[in-house]
Amino acid sequence: MSRGMGGVFLNLSASVVIAMAGVPEDMRRLTLDDAMTHSWIDGDELKLQFYVERQAEPFASVDLTVETEAVEEGEYRGRYALAVFAEPAENDAGRDMWMAEGDVTCFVE
């Protein structure tokens, strides 16, 4: 755990399981270990942002933002905001954007 400016997270383990109807199957279970684009840990605050893009066509992405506060040493609770975008397949009139938010708990050693 880093509490100073410029600190890094070591051995980060993060994953997301998305249960919303209509989200493409390959975007429902993602490992986010290498997808952190922003992190902030200062005092009692922990903020993380993860972003993943599908490597094949059609384009799809997942953006997950987590904002928490410490409730005890190494445990943070707060809220998350999730946005999933997927280019519709050809001749598909389905949705192309899904959003969710809710409660989240994070553990830091």
Image (cartoon, grey):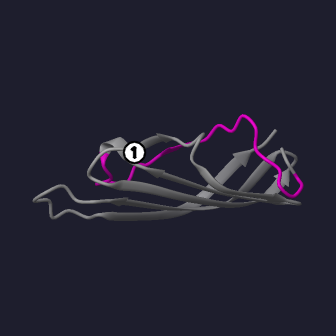
Instruction: Say which residue appears at 72% left-offset and 60% top-offset.
Output: 68
Residue 66 lies in the magenta stretch? no
Instruction: Name the one closer to the observer, 42 or 99.
Output: 42
Magenta segment boundaries in residue numbering: 3-24
Secondary structure type for disc 1: loop
Quick one: quadrant of the C terminus? top right
Write down the quadrant of residue 74 in the picture.
top right
Q: Is residue 12 magenta?
A: yes
Percent of width and height locating residue 26? 34, 42
Q: Is residue 104 left or right of residue 9?
A: left
Residue 25 in percent (x, y) is at 31, 43
Q: Quadrant of the N terminus?
A: top right
> In this rendering, would 39 be left or right of 99?
right
Which amino acid type corresponds to the residue marked 1 in the rendered image?
Arg
Q: Which residue, given by chain and number where applicable, does mark 1 sit on?
A: 28
Query: Looking at this view, is 57 or 91 the one in front?
Result: 57
> Based on the displayed image, in which of its 4 quarters is residue 107 positioned?
top right
Predominant secondary structure in magenta?
Answer: loop
Q: Position of residue 104 (x, y in %)?
A: 63, 54
| Left or right, 86 with reference to 99 | left
Residue at left offset 88%, top offset 53%: 3
Q: Is residue 12 above or below residue 53?
A: above
Horizontal and vertical percent position of residue 11:
72, 34
Task: Give the residue at x 50% y 58%.
Answer: 63
Please tell me how crowded label 1 is: few (under 14), some (14-19), or many (20+) other residues with Cα within 10 Å: some
Q: Is residue 76 above or below residue 79?
A: above
The residue under the point 20% across, 62% down is: 94
Is residue 18 or residue 26 the one in the foreground? 26
